[in-house]
Image (cartoon, rainbow, N blue to C red):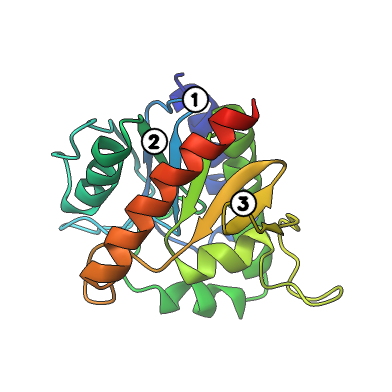
Amino acid sequence: MEVEKFITGELNKIKDNPLYKEFNFNYAFPKELISNALLFIGLNPSANAENDKSGKLEVYELDPNGKNHQYFKKFADVSKYCNYPWTHIDLLFFRETNQSEVNHILTKTNGVGFIWDQLQISKKLLELANPEIIIVNNTLARTFLGKDKVGGNNTWLNFDFKFDEEIGTYLWNNTPVFFTSMLTGQRALDNGSYERLKWQVKRTIRIINSRS
């Protein structure tokens, strides 16, 4: 399912919005999404080597084997272990390696709006992807989805997650959701936790298939 045209149109609205003129970034997003797959959700794409922050829109294609970037290799590994296709989105599109920059943006006058408008794009992508299973591998991404809301605070996208005792994880609209830390990098899951995640995702696929 090609999403390049949709994302490009929506990001141009954000880039051209005078309220957000102080936020100078490049943006990156996938050309296509695979529907009914394992959907990995991250926070935002890291900055490229140049990182000139000129407002470029950069499109990338997801290699099924994860060869186009180290970040995607673990996704491909989980996919192979489970014998199930995978796809990926970031909730935000601006390129920045330092995650603390997101918190800094939120302190700006129009920072919440800048983040919120991007979340509306990713929400639509999530709906279009209609994932079989969601794996959220970033703590702040979990917050933006609404997992950390308390009462009327920290709601963001305000998704509701209910714990399913049989599969041992959460459901969102009957879709199993796993919340985990990053799968690569310095703060990645340890090997034991990573192997358990793969096993649980594969087990969950069997369970949800038996329910249908």
In this rendering, position of residue 75 left or right of residue 153: left
Residue drawn at x 33%, y 52% as measured from the top left: 198
CA gap, disc 3 and disc 2: 18 Å
CA gap, disc 1 and disc 2: 8 Å
Residue drawn at x 35%, y 64% as measured from the top left: 96
Q: Earlier in the sequence, mark 1 or mark 2?
A: 1
Say if 151 sits above or below 18 in the image.
Answer: below
Q: Does the image show residue 54?
A: no
Which amino acid type is marked by label 2?
Answer: Thr
Tell me whether the residue at label 1 lies in contact with that at label 2, contact meaning CB atoms closer than 8 angstroms.
yes
Picture disc at residue 92: none
How packed mark 2 is, by other alpha carbons closer than 10 Å (few <14, some 14-19, many 20 or more), is many
Q: Secondary structure at mark 3?
A: helix
Q: Nearer the viewer, mark 1 or mark 3?
A: 1
How packed mark 1 is, by other alpha carbons closer than 10 Å (few <14, some 14-19, many 20 or more), is some
Q: Earlier in the sequence, mark 3 or mark 2?
A: 2
Q: Residue furthest right?
A: 152
Q: Secondary structure at mark 2?
A: strand
Which amino acid type is marked by label 3?
Answer: Leu
In this rendering, position of residue 43 left or right of residue 13: left
In this rendering, position of residue 198 left or right of residue 116: left
Say if 1 sits above or below 146 in the image.
Answer: above
| Viewport quadrant of the C terminus | top right
Say if 97 sits above or below 73 in the image.
Answer: below
User: How many numbered marks are there?
Assistant: 3
Which residue corresponds to mark 2?
Answer: 87
Picture disc at residue 35: 1
